[in-house]
Image (spheres, rainbow, N blue to C red):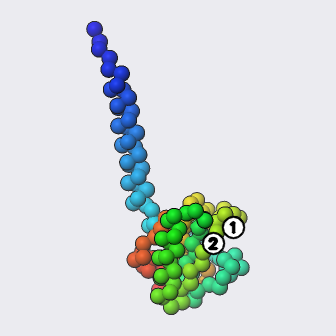
Amino acid sequence: MRVRCPGVTGLVVVVIVLAAATAFGLWRRARDGRVVEARVDEPLLGPDELGAPLGERATLVQFSTAFCQPCRAARATLAHVAADTDGVVHVEIDAEHHLELVRRLDIMRTPTTLVLDGSGRIVRRATGAPRLADVRAALPA
């Protein structure tokens, strides 16, 4: 005779779902805000597309949305770096009002930060709120 415990099956499902959610959360936390090298085929961006002049050394382009909480932290970090570093400009772009540019640059979430060199070439990018030290390290020499 086989005894069945219906609660055990439900418990196993709950444990599996919790383990998967925890693994995803840890993976997301590790990647969030990390500044990575840009793809080779990234386009050049100019003042016309950004709505502001490029910085001589670098331009920090932040794509944000109105209700994005991490965008506020990213804004503060990028503005701080731009204010403290000669030749660096911070430009914030509302992703909802620039959908063509968002699609062209493959922006999947906000905040997304692009680091441009003095000529407008995208050299690095970060999704999520980047850390201050990572932004400073990502600036072109």
Question: On the rendered structure, is 85 left or right of 106?
Answer: left
- Left-right relation of 45 to 25: right
Disc on the earlier residue, 1 or 2: 2
Q: Residue at x 38, y 35 (%)?
A: 14
Q: In the drawing, what numbered circle is on residue 98?
A: 1
Q: Amino acid at mark 2?
A: Ile
Q: Residue at x 32, y 17 (%)?
A: 4
Depth order, front residue of 6/98: 6
Q: Please, what is the three-letter code of the amino acid marked with disc 1? A: His
Residue 97, horizontal then vertical, whole percent: 69, 66
Residue 32 left/right relative to 96: left
Q: To which quarter of the image does residue 6 belong?
A: top left
Percent of width and height locating residue 111: 54, 66
> Which labelled disc corresponds to residue 79?
none
**What residue do we see at 61% from left, 65% from top?**
66
Q: Residue at label 2? A: 93
Where is residue 114 drawn, in percent x and y?
55, 72
**Relative to 47, residue 2 above or below:** above
Label 1 CA crowd tier, 10 Å (few <14, some 14–19, many 20+): few
Among the 4 quarters of the image, the one containing residue 39: bottom right
Image marks 1 and 2: residues in contact by CB distance under 8 Å: yes
Residue, far bottom:
86
- Categorize mark 2 by other alpha carbons within 10 Å: few (<14), some (14-19), many (20+): many
Asked if residue 127 lies left or right of residue 133, the reply is right
